[in-house]
């Protein structure tokens, strides 16, 4: 815990070095009582049975046989060295002759709460600080805590975090806290809690010279603004946004219409926003302080990310001719010169393509199937004809065909004289029992992938 007493000669010097503070509230208990505080309340499970340990206001400092003396106050406390102060003491100890100074009877396992019952009004004040002097010796078992709330009967919130406790100081120390929640409040109350954890040494928990100070004057609302890494985006992508709002900023809220995924919707510095669909998104930041709020909005245009589907027809891979650029890949390697919407493959592999649509890249991959026979018109050496005898003809291929071919034979007049099927996986197909006259015939080979025409001069 950071002690302002180690940084400043006094609270006055500390505040005058930063802001011209006005005292809004103070309590030094030097009347011997405090009508604006209620001791031993049931807030946060406080024990008000008054059976042993309890809160009291007095100016007892001397120790006894069982109770250690309470340290004298330093000159920074009003009425030092032995002014009235609010503290825990053991009523049981007093009943057996011990002093009513800052001591406790360890082992009750209870908590004890003292609550402010006259609210502090900080309306019109900023930079509001809550300050007090304290002492609490011992260990982390029996500790002091400080709380605040901003409405009557409202929830008590610990200052400044849920793990801050007061212990380990047998002499007086001073602490001062500022939270945005203290500023410009029509209702602000504070409370002190002591927890008896069963161990620890005196003093128990003592409090003195409480004050609330702030800077008066009208607070100007902030001017909201942000900077973005881009004014456009692609679907399923993200843009970074940086808060550049002006003025005093207590908190911010990032929002979008329609809804997008905001990584840190309350970050006062920056956030990433990811856009799930295409369209125009209104991105807004609202900046808040005690003087009000302000909102800035900008439109981010989100372009659809392309999702082309590769199709294979024979050895040709293709995607729609609807994009501004194309790049084909064999595995992870780009194929040099393959920059159109089609690519003719020469071997079975996993191929991919990346296309661009209005600056948004997208792609697809495909593991190709078997390569199919190409047309005879362009690669005539792939097929040839042999005639073993006057009633037979053999059609040959330079490699086993991947898909079955239909064989149709026509005479010179165009009359079909035969239909046959050439099964996949073979090099040759022999057709027997041809009872046709000598002369010129046309042999057509075809399937869904290719077609070829051969001339046969029957002899």
Image (cartoon, rainbow, N blue to C red):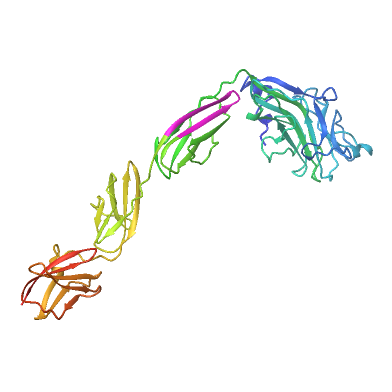
The residue that appears at 70% across and 35% down in the rendered structure is 157
The residue that appears at 32% across and 43% down in the rendered structure is 357
Is there any visible trace of residue 316 in the rendered image? yes
The residue that appears at 30% across and 57% down in the rendered structure is 311
Query: Residue 163: within the magenta?
Result: no
Q: Relative to 437, is 252 on the left or the right?
A: right
Q: Where is residue 395 in the image (x, y as percent from the top left)?
A: 15, 74
Q: Relative to 457, is 160 on the left or the right?
A: right
Query: Residue 297: within the magenta?
Result: yes
User: Height in image: 303 above or below 251?
Assistant: below
Along the viewing direction, whichever of 341 and 435 lies nearer the viewer: 435
Q: Where is residue 240 in the image (x, y as percent from the top left)?
A: 45, 38
Along the viewing direction, whichever of 173 and 208 lies nearer the viewer: 208
Along the viewing direction, whichever of 254 and 203 lies nearer the viewer: 254
> In which quadrant of the rendered image does the C terminus lie?
bottom left
Specify the segment rendered in magenta: 282-299
Q: Relative to 332, is 250 on the left or the right?
A: right
User: Which secondary structure type mostly characterizes the magenta part of the structure?
Assistant: strand
Along the viewing direction, whichever of 106 and 73 lies nearer the viewer: 106
Is there any visible trace of residue 171 in the rendered image? no
Residue 22 sits in quarter: top right
Q: Relative to 95, is 109 on the left or the right?
A: left
Residue 453 sits in quarter: bottom left
Residue that lies at the very extreme toward the top in this rendered image:
217
User: Height in image: 269 above or below 122?
Assistant: below
> In which quadrant of the rendered image does the N terminus lie?
top right
Residue that lies at the very extreme toward the right in this rendered image:
96
């Amino acid at each position: 815990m950071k002690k302002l007493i180690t940084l400043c000669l006094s609270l006055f010097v500390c505040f005058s070095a930063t802001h011209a503070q006005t005292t809004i509230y103070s309590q030094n208990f030097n009347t011997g009582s405090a009508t604006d505080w209620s001791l031993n309340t049931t807030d946060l499970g406080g024990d008000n049975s008054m059976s042993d340990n309890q809160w009291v206001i007095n100016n007892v400092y001397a120790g006894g046989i069982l109770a250690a003396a309470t340290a004298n106050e330093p000159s920074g406390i009003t009425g030092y060295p032995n002014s009235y102060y609010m503290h825990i003491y053991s009523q049981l100890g007093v009943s057996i002759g011990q002093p009513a100074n800052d001591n406790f009877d360890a082992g009750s396992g209870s908590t004890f709460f003292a609550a402010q019952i006259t609210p502090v009004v900080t309306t019109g004040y900023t930079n509001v600080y809550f300050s007090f002097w304290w002492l609490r010796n011992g260990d982390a078992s029996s500790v002091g805590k400080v709380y605040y709330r901003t409405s009557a009967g409202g929830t008590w919130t610990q200052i400044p975090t849920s793990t801050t406790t007061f212990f380990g100081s047998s002499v007086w120390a001073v602490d001062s806290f500022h939270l945005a929640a203290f500023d410009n409040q029509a209702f602000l109350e504070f409370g002190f809690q002591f927890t008896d954890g069963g161990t620890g040494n005196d003093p128990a928990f003592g409090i003195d010279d409480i004050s609330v100070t702030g800077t008066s004057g009208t607070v100007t609302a902030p001017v909201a603004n942000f900077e973005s890494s881009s004014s456009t985006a692609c679907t399923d992508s993200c843009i970074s946004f940086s808060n550049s709002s002006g003025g005093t900023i207590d908190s911010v809220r990032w929002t979008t219409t329609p809804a997008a995924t905001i990584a840190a919707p309350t970050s006062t510095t920056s956030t990433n926003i990811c856009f799930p669909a295409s369209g125009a998104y209104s991105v807004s930041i609202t900046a808040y302080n005690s003087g009000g709020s302000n909102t800035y909005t900008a439109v981010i245009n989100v372009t659809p990310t392309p999702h082309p589907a590769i199709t294979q027809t024979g050895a040709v891979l293709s995607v729609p001719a609807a994009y501004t650029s194309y790049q084909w890949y064999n595995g992870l390697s780009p194929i040099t010169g393959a920059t159109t919407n089609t690519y003719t493959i020469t071997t079975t592999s996993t191929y991919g393509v990346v296309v661009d649509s209005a600056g948004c890249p997208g792609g697809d991959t495909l593991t190709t199937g078997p390569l199919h026979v190409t047309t005879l018109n362009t690669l005539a050496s792939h097929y040839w004809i042999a005639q073993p005898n006057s009633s037979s003809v053999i059609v040959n291929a330079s490699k086993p065909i991947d898909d079955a071919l239909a064989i149709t034979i026509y005479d010179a007049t165009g009359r079909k004289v035969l239909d046959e099927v050439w099964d996949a996986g073979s090099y040759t197909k022999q057709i027997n029992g041809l009872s046709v006259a000598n002369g010129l015939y046309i042999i057509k080979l075809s399937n869904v992938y290719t077609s070829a025409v051969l001339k046969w001069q029957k002899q």
